[in-house]
Image: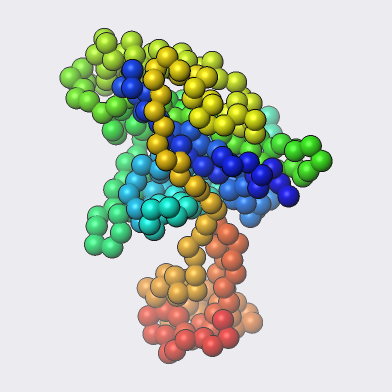
Amino acid sequence: MTLGNLIAWDDTILPFQLDNCDVRGRVVRLDGTLDTVLSQHNYPPAIEALVAEAALLTAMIGQSIKLRWKLSLQIRGDGPARLIATDYYAPEKEGDPAMVRAYASYDEDRLDADVAAFDQIGKGFFAVLIDQGDGKTPYSGMTPIAGNSLSDCAQVYFAQSEQLPTRFHLSFGRSIWAGGEESWRAGGVMLQHMPKASPHVTGEGGSGEGGVLSADDLLGEDDKENWNRANILLSSVEELELIGPSVSPTALLTRLFHEEDPRVYDPQQVRFGCTCSEDRVRESLSIYSVKDIAYMTKDNGRLTADCQFCGAHYDLDPATVGKDAKGQDSEA
C-alpha cells in the first residue's frame, strides 16, 4: 500500500481566504492521483517533472470552475518537450471527486539530461481552456512561454489575461514510506489577490520581463503592501511542509498565515480519471472518408486507437467507423 492511500488529506484541494490581506488561495496535495497519472507512461525524468508540475497547476486552477465544467492546460513548444496536456473535470455533483488526467508528447532523441526540464520546452505558448458544456462557447486564453517554470507561465497568464496577481509555490518528487513502496508526492500553495479594478493598467505593457504585467502594475499601494506581505510569508514554507505526510493543509495555513486570519472552505477530493470510450473514438473518426479510414487501417484489417491519457486500447472494424459506417463492430 502506498503512502497516498494512508493520509486523509492526500489528493485534496483546500480553498482558503486570508481576510486581513484580501488574498484567496488553495492548498493542493496530489499523491495517489499523480502516481497514477505518471504510471501510465515511462517518461524520462525531465518529462515526469513537467507533467507533475502541470498536473498540480491544473488542480489548483481547476478547483474554481463550476460543476460539470472542464479546464485544460496546454503547453506547446518547439523544444524536445513538444506538448504537455492536462484536464481537470469538475465534479458531476456536490460531494463527488474531481478528476485529473495528463500526458506529454516529446522527442526523446532531442532531450538533454544536462538541460533543466522547463528549458526543454523552448519557445511556445501556455494556454488555458475552459469547456462549459454543450451549447456554450469554450473559453481560451494564451500567453507566451515565460520565466523559469510552468508556475511562472501560469502567473504571467493570470496577470495578462485576468489581471489578477497570482503566485504558485510547488514541490513534488518520489518518496518512500517507511517499510513501503516508492510513490510520488506533490503539493503546493496558490495565492491570488481578490479581484478588483486595476486603474494602473495603461495598455502600454507592464513592468515585468518582456513587458508583461506584474503585481506592481495591477495593485494600488495598500493592496501592494498586503500582497507583498502574503508572498513573504509563503516564501518561508519548507519543501517538506508542502508534501510531507505529517503536516495537514490546515496546519500549514495556520503556520504560514496565522496573523492574516486564514479562513478555510470545504476541501475538494481529486482522483485520476479518464473520459475516453469506444463511443468517443467512433465519434472522433466520424469525420473521415472511406479513403481516410482505409489509410489508417492496419495490415491485419483492423483499425486501432490508443488513449494518450490512460493507455486504453481500442480495436475496431474499419467498416463500422467513418462517414460511411455500415454498422457497429460486435467484436470491439
Q: Is residue 246 above or below residue 2?
A: above
For the residue pair 190 and 254, the one nearer the viewer reads as 254
- In the displayed orientation, state which residue is furthest to the right: 179
Horizontal and vertical percent position of residue 242: 58, 29
Q: Is residue 172 above or below residue 20?
A: below
Q: For residue 177, which quarter of the picture?
A: top right
Q: Is residue 299 left or right of residue 138?
A: right
Q: Quadrant of the C terminus?
A: bottom right
Identified at 60% across, 69% down, the residue is 313
Q: Is residue 74 left or right of residue 163?
A: right
For the residue pair 174 and 123, the one nearer the viewer reads as 174
Identified at 49% across, 70% down, the residue is 277
Q: Is residue 107 left or right of residue 256?
A: right
Identified at 65% across, 47% down, the residue is 5
Q: Is residue 141 above or below residue 102?
A: above
What colouring does the structure picture have? rainbow
Identified at 59% across, 66% down, the residue is 312
Horizontal and vertical percent position of residue 159: 32, 27
For the residue pair 48 and 204, the one nearer the viewer reads as 48
Horizontal and vertical percent position of residue 270: 50, 48
- Do we see residue 176 in this rendering? yes
